[in-house]
Amino acid sequence: MSSSGAETLGKDTPEETWKSVLSAEEYHVLRQKGTERPGTGEYNKLYPEDGVFACRGCGQPLYTAETKFNSGCGWPAFYDFIPGSVDTHVDTSMGMRRVEITCSNCGGHLGHVFEGEGFPTPTDQRHCVNSVSIKYIPGGPK
């Protein structure tokens, strides 16, 4: 179900539909693999005690609030995702090897995952996520 609840959105949703339901910035990041400027996202410094962060495109829950941490990178950071909610893909678009993360339901671009940076988290991973790719839902999905 989309974040608006109006229709089911997924990997087979036509680009024309995405353009009609997402803002220009959301479309650029989620569908064209863009990136918001560091330090500008609405969830960069939000650390709620409960709830979930869902895909802004399709509404699928991706991360729990308890896995969000302050990495100082300028984007929301999570150390783990809800099982089955995130897919990973090798990304060499910037002349280096990175691992892209996307919503497993709609394929929307979330950001990148980094490992071995030494953060004191259970997974030693940092899912660096664009705020515009996610929507915070207090208490969890409705």
Image (tube, rainbow, N blue to C red):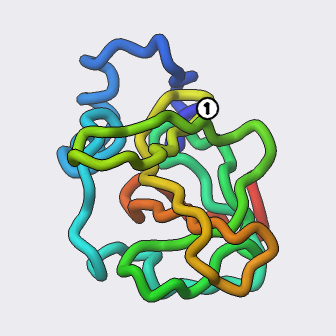
Q: Residue at x 30, y 49 (%)?
A: 96
Q: Amino acid at mark 1?
A: Ser
Left or right placement of residue 108 versus residue 60 in this view: left
Q: From where the camera sits, is residue 23 visible?
A: no
Total marks in image: 1
Q: Does dot 1 land on a helix, a strand or a loop?
A: loop
Left or right placement of residue 62 versus residue 38 in this view: right
Q: Position of residue 97 (x, y in %)?
A: 38, 46
- Residue 38's quadrant in the figure? bottom left
Question: How many other residues sit within 10 Å of disc 1, few (<14), some (14-19) or many (≥20)?
Answer: some
Q: Nearer the viewer, residue 111 or 123?
A: 123
Q: Position of residue 57 (x, y in %)?
A: 46, 40
Q: Residue at x 31, y 39 (%)?
A: 92
Q: Is residue 71 shown above or below 138?
A: below
Q: Nearer the viewer, residue 119 or 6?
A: 119
Q: Residue at x 45, y 36 (%)?
A: 90
Circle 1 residue: 104
- Residue 137's quadrant in the figure? bottom right
Q: Position of residue 51 (x, y in %)?
A: 74, 69
Q: Residue at x 60, y 36 (%)?
A: 87
Q: From where the camera sits, is residue 59 visible?
A: yes
